Structures are given as C-alpha cells and as structure tokens.
Image (spheres, coloured by chain):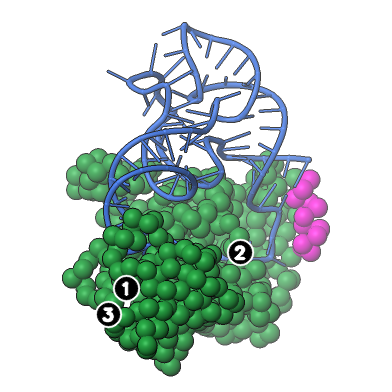
Chain colours: A green, B blue
Amino acid sequence: MEENWPELLQAKAKPEKKVLPPLPNVEKYSKVVTRFSPNPDCVLHLGSARAVVLSWKYAKMYNGEFYLRFEDTDPRYKRPVLEFYDLIREDLIWLGCRWDKEIIQSDRLEIYYEYAKRLLEVGGGYVCTCQPQTFKEKILSCKPCPCRELPKETQLERWEKMLDGSFGEGEAVVRVKTDLNHPNPAVRDWPAIRIIDTKKFPHPRVGDKYRVWPLYNFSSGLDDHLLGITHIIRGKEHLTNEQRQRFLYNYFGWDYPEAIHYGRLKITGAVLSKSEIKLGVEKGVYGGYGDPRLATLIALRRRGITAEAVVRLMLEVGVKPVDVTLSWENLYAYNRKILDPKADRYFFVSNPIKLEVLNVEKPYTAKLHLHPDYPEKGFRVFQLKPENGRLTLLVSTSDLNLLKPEKVVRLMGLFNIQVKNVEEKLVKAVFHSETYEEAKKLHAPLIHYLPPTKGVKTVVVMPDGSTIEGLAEESCGKLKAGDVIQFERFGFVKIEKVNQEILAYYTHK
RNA sequence: GCUCCGGUAGUAUAGCCCGGUUAAGUAUACCGGCCUUUCGAGCCGGUGGUCGCGGGUUCAAAUCCCGCCCGGAGCACCA
C-alpha cells in the first residue's frame, strides 16, 4: 500500500490536501490504466477538463498509465477536424496531464472489422437491413426483426457486402444481439457499425479509404478492453452505454472495466456545450475559441487562469454522479492563491482624467515595490517635477467617487492631497502632507496615478468581452506576452501583446 | 411516457457502504477585527445547514427500509 498509494498516506499527514476517494477494485488489476477519449471536433472546455484531470490523476495516484484516445469515427455528423487533434494535445499539455500512449481510432478500422466478423461468427450480432423506423417499431414491442433470425452464414455474407460496397449508406447496419425484453428499449439490439458515404463525407485523416465505420459503443467498447483500460471515468450520459457494451463483452468472454460516471458540470453564465460553442464561433458570435466569454481551456489560459487552478477545482469537484454548477469565484479563489505571489504590481489608470495638485514645493520620486510581499524584487520609480508648484497627474475615472471636495487622499508612495474642485475631466487639489502616517491618521484612501506624459496606452479585455482603455505605467512597456501581472486596485491581467500599445486580458480581482 | 441515477449551508465537497465522542467537517463566498503605502495577499473571529419531504426500524439515523416530491441522464445508422 505504501508503494502504490503514497499520496493517500501523505494525505493522512496533511488533511488540508484534497484527495480523491479510492478507485474501486484496484486490486483486481496489475496496473491501473485510464483514458481520455475525445472526439476531435472541438477544443476542450472546463467540462472536458473534468474527464482529463480525473482520469490522469487517478492513473498517477496508482502509478498507472493514462492514455489519450481520439474517437474520430464519425466522418459525417460529428466530423473530426484536423486542427483539433493538435489543439486537444496542447490543452492536455497545458493541464500538465501527460499521456503515456496515444491512440487514434481512425487508424484501427481493420481491428474493428476483425471483431465484427468474430461477433457474427459467435452469433452475437447480425446485419440488419431494415428501415430504421420499422426496426424501431419491432424493438419497442420486443419483437425480433427478420434479419436477426437469419443464419450465421448469411450474416457473414451480408457483412462482406457491407465491406465490398454492395450496400450503400443507410442500407445495412451491424447490430449486437442483446435482450429483446430488456427493460430499457435503448439497450435492445443496439447498432454497432454503419456505412458512411465517405466520397461525400471524407474523413479528415483517412479520406474515403473506409466506408464502414463503427459506432461509439462498438469501437469504444472494444478499445477499452483491447487497450487494457481498467477504469473508465466518463459522464453519466454514458450510463446506458455500459449496459449495452456488457453484451458485447459477454460474447467475447471479457470482463467489463470499472466504470465511473460523473454528473454534468456547468459554470454560471458560460456556455459549456460543444455544439453551442462551435455554432457561436462559426456564426461569429464569439471571436474564436479563445473568446473570454467561453469556458474553453484556450480562453481560460488566455485570461490568465492557471492550469493548477483548473486541476484543483476538478479534484475538488470529484467524481460524483450529481450535476454541479460551479461559480467562477471558486475558480478565481484557487487561481488568486497561485497568481498572487508571482504577479508583479503595476499602475494602470483606466479612462484617465487630469489631477492638478498645487503647492507642490519640490520634485518628488515615488518608489513602489514590484511586489509588496517580496521587496527584493525591486521597485518601479516615478520622477515627478512640479512647475511653479503645480504638479499634473492622471488618475482613474473610477476613483472619482473618492475624490470629493475637501477630502484627503493619499497618492501611493508620494504624498497626500486635499481635493478642492472636481470637474468632469479635471480634478484640482492642493498638497496636504507628506507622510503615510499622516494619511493613516486621517483614514485617507490610497489611490494610484500616473505621470501625465509617459503612460503606455493599454486595452484590457474583460471577461464579458467588453474592453476598458487606459494607460499603464511606462515600465509595463518591457512586459512580454504571456506575463501575468496585477494592475493595483484593478485586478490581475494577462498580457496578450505589447508593441506601441498593450493588449491585456482581465483575469479577476 | 419508458429505463436508469441522484438530492448535505450561496457555490462546491467530506461523512452514508461498516448506523452513536463531529448532534455535521473543509474550501470558497459573505460579515467583523488585526496587519499591510492596492478595494490584493496574509492572520484571527463570526453569520449561515431542521443533512429534499413524510413515515418506519433502533436506546440511537445525514447514515438502514418504504412512500412521496424535486432534479438530472439516456431512449440516434452521435460521441
């Protein structure tokens, strides 16, 4: 146990560390093997992250293996798209979920054909040429369709005809014989393999090389056994698929893996459905898969959400079959803990307005820590020279609620001022005092500011897609794309681009 | 409609299988205090749950049994 579950023991010593509940029947297997099996028809989102993180984490917990398996067996209705294979790989790498083996189902058609034949040979299936509608009527009344009764030899002949092109799309389908009286009609004689006109609907990887394609329950069911998957972690929409696949396993004399079905995951206000995301992107509702309104991993990454935060959240949510509605605050809280010690602090003045301070008798130098908790990181410095006692600065419109006549306000790292007059685009104030202690005594609020001429124009894209414009301090010009910083009193942002201007994405407060 | 699966504070989660020193823990959110030249972080404290509802078994039930209500998933030649 010490060897296999070191993390479990470690968790005992450190109870604050969240640990997943043990996997069932681990002792039955020499090694735990899990898999994540996406259809490469879209990028990954927060919901997909659940399957990835849990499958990966469990494999690691038991020193097992984690596989990535692309389930790209529908060239027609849920067409795989080439670029998504790579984007999914990138998402997994970003999450830190390295896979030990990669499998692509469209490379494995011959294997599925072989097992289809074996299934027909053992009498576990049949080739059905009924119209879907007439078949459905039969099955709903627990009656076999005529094809089911045909002898094995005929089934094999029909199978050959599926392969050699004698049957066209929709004309024949391989079904797995189950129980015609099964209480759930959806389980009765489910379809395993169908024909697709790949001249019309070529597969992005293998083109029109194959016309006969397995359905989910057949290919996925076979592969889970063939690849030695011991624990399947997937959404509860697959609950009845387990029932179906068990019939297949019985014909081959296999044991079904341990299957865990978790509930649906939602996050307040964000679309988490692949089809809706795709539609929105295609229609231009979203500016792409990285649109900040989307909960795709690309978008989260772009916004400065860290993979660690996503992983933590997924471990927290766990594998329960209940539906969960996450709130962004929860994700943000995890992320903030990770970001806060790393992010340097800078000033950003949104929608700047002028602040004129009179009675400033000498030049001042403001030195501000890059990070208040780590003074060793250094400073940013503002040199401020008044002209004839007048110092002009820029402050944020959003601080107008603090800048009321006669109020004393401290300019961070500088001095205290007393507001005199407030106009729409101009605040006039006078020098009040110098020390922080004085400001503290007066309970003066602290605000940030910028020298009037040296700011870098900055656009911040907010999570709702809107933008806020303003000026960032000069030293932000040396930031690089990908840096996550904190604009003090504004929030964390991730830098997207720096040239003459800065483009940043808002992470959270 | 049919077949399954669930229901613990605003959100998420632990405990339920092996009923009792925890008559409900943790995280986050919220409120207050301390600290701090950020409305951030940190530290301390607090509010918040009749464990879906009703009944039963028991000395004792969030934990076992039954009924009800509510929610979800599936019922494709999709994955």
Q: Position of residue A86 (x, y in %)?
A: 45, 79
Q: Is residue A103 left or right of residue A114?
A: left
The quarter of the displayed image where residue A54 is located? bottom left
Q: Residues within 10 Å of mark 3 (few under 14, many from 20)?
A: few
Establish if A309 lies above or below A448: above
**Circle 2 or circle 1, nearest the eye:** 1
- Find the magenta span and give its range: A130-141
Q: Is residue B69 left or right of residue A402?
A: right
- Mark 3 = which residue? A365
Residue found at x 28% / y 66%: A435
Q: Position of residue A329 (x, y in %)?
A: 48, 56
Label 3's element?
Answer: strand
Q: Residues within 10 Å of mark 2 (few under 14, many from 20)?
A: some
Question: Same chain, marks 2 and 1?
Answer: yes
- Mark 1 = which residue? A414
Of residue A301 and residue A409, the one placed in the foreground of this image is: A409
Q: Could you tell me the amino acid type at mark 1?
A: Leu
Q: Is residue A494 left or right of residue A185?
A: left
